[in-house]
Image (cartoon, coloured by chain):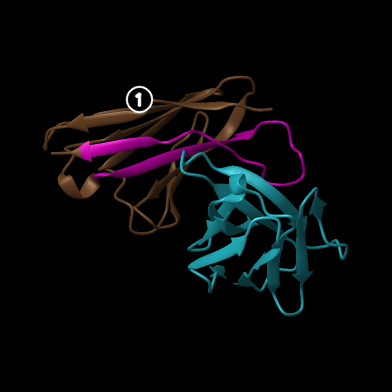
Amino acid sequence: GAVVSQHPSRVICKSGTSVKIECRSLDFQATTMFWYRQFPKQSLMLMATSNEGSKATYEQGVEKDKFLINHASLTLSTLTVTSAHPEDSSFYICSARPSRDRGFNEQFFGPGTRLTVL
Amino acid sequence: AQTVTQSQPEMSVQEAETVTLSCTYDTSESDYYLFWYKQPPSRQMILVIRQEAYKQQNATENRFSVNFQKAAKSFSLKISDSQLGDAAMYFCAFDRDDKIIFGKGTRLHILP
């Protein structure tokens, strides 16, 4: 099956620093990737939709200057949390949709990245 | 706006028994997809089953089946012969226009 990786799996950083999270589709090309945020014991909240070669589309209430998304290739999207603060601590999950049209929005999820901001 | 409601925050079932997780959704669209995802303690999201709205037949995947009631906007998941490995968070999800909207989830406990 399709595999999506995320790196790093865990990151601890100091307040004010920036953190980059990578999302890679390992065995397929993904025109579209999605970034979700999940607070403890809560559901996944879609943050943004990332399309290869174009600007990301952010959901309402998500600060685009805080969460920078780059989708430079068909297999890689990155999420950079800029000037991180403790309230940005969360579990970040990416997913990727294969470029081949299957007639439905089949998304494959990465294993997630736990960000802790001290 | 589309919403997905899971009214059962937690459920428990005896091993080998059957359990049904409820989900309702709200949309004005007629063509869409519905999913149930499983999130075990590893937090890896796993697709359990999907249903196309235009299909009247309920989807089935081994021990997992759904009861899709389009008019009622209801999409419940039945797990038969529950196993210890089924213990997880289960999210009902709605897809339209390339976005997946998740419900709040139901934590399922399997009692040995």
Camera sees residue A43: yes
Asked if residue A2 lies in the magenta stretch, the reply is no
Q: Which residue is drawn at 54% across and 66% down?
A: B11
Q: Where is residue A74 in the image (x, y as percent from the top left)?
A: 56, 24
Q: In which quarter of the image is the C terminus of chain B?
A: bottom right
Task: Identify the hue of chain B.
Answer: cyan
Left/right of residue A46 with respect to residue A16 in the rendered view: right
Task: Identify the hue of chain A.
Answer: brown
| Residue A106 drawn above or below residue A19 | below
| Residue B41 drawn above or below residue A28 | below
Left/right of residue B77 with respect to residue B6 in the rendered view: right
Give the number of marks.
Answer: 1
Q: Is mark 1 on a helix, strand or loop?
A: loop
Q: What residue does disc 1 label?
A: A8
State the residue lying farthest toward the right: B57
Q: What stretch is highlighted in magenta?
A: A89-116
Q: Nearer the viewer, residue B10 or A31?
A: B10
Q: Residue at x 74, y 55 (%)?
A: B81
Camera sees residue A18: no
| Callout 1: chain | A
